[in-house]
Amino acid sequence: MKSTSPATAGHQPAEPLIIAAHLAKRLAISQAWVYQAVKDGRLPHRRLGSLDGQVRFFPSEIDTRLDEQRLAWAPAGRR
């Protein structure tokens, strides 16, 4: 009988983090825009190590943020 540790029992593997270059390519935007959006707090992100550490992103969090923005958007004059 195969045993499973409590830490892995019933859990899916963690979602891989992606770097700014991959996010920029995925969204067809510039890497500079990604870093500016991080600085402005417009993109959910993680810093590795310290407050000025490398920036990483969970794709699912980015997708959720984009969905929220799409729902909140209305053409000019329709609000």
Image (tube, helix red, strand yellow):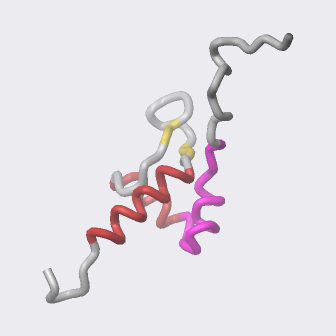
| Above or below for 6 versus 41 | above
Relative to 36, is 47 above or below? above
Residue 37 place in picture, x, y as percent: 41, 59
The N terminus, quarter of image: top right
What is the count of numbered marks?
A: 0
Quadrant housing the C terminus? bottom left
Q: Which residue is rendered at x = 67% and y = 21% of the image?
A: 8
Name the outermost residue toward the right.
Answer: 1
Position above or below: 65 against 51: below
Residue found at x 40% / y 64%: 67
Residue extent of the magenta highlight: 16-31
Q: Quadrant of residue 78?
A: bottom left
Toward the viewer: 50 or 68? Answer: 68
Residue 13 sits in which quadrant? top right
Please provide percent x and percent y for residue 6: 64, 12
**The quarter of the displayed image where residue 17 is located:** top right
Q: Residue at x 64, y 68 (%)?
A: 25
Residue for point 20% across, 87% down: 76
- Which residue is nearer to you in this view: 60 or 37? 60
Drawn side of residue 4 relative to residue 65, left or right:
right
User: Residue 75: x, y in percent?
Assistant: 25, 86
Which sits in the foreground, 48 or 12? Answer: 12
Q: In the rendered view, does 8 fall on the left or right side of 39? A: right
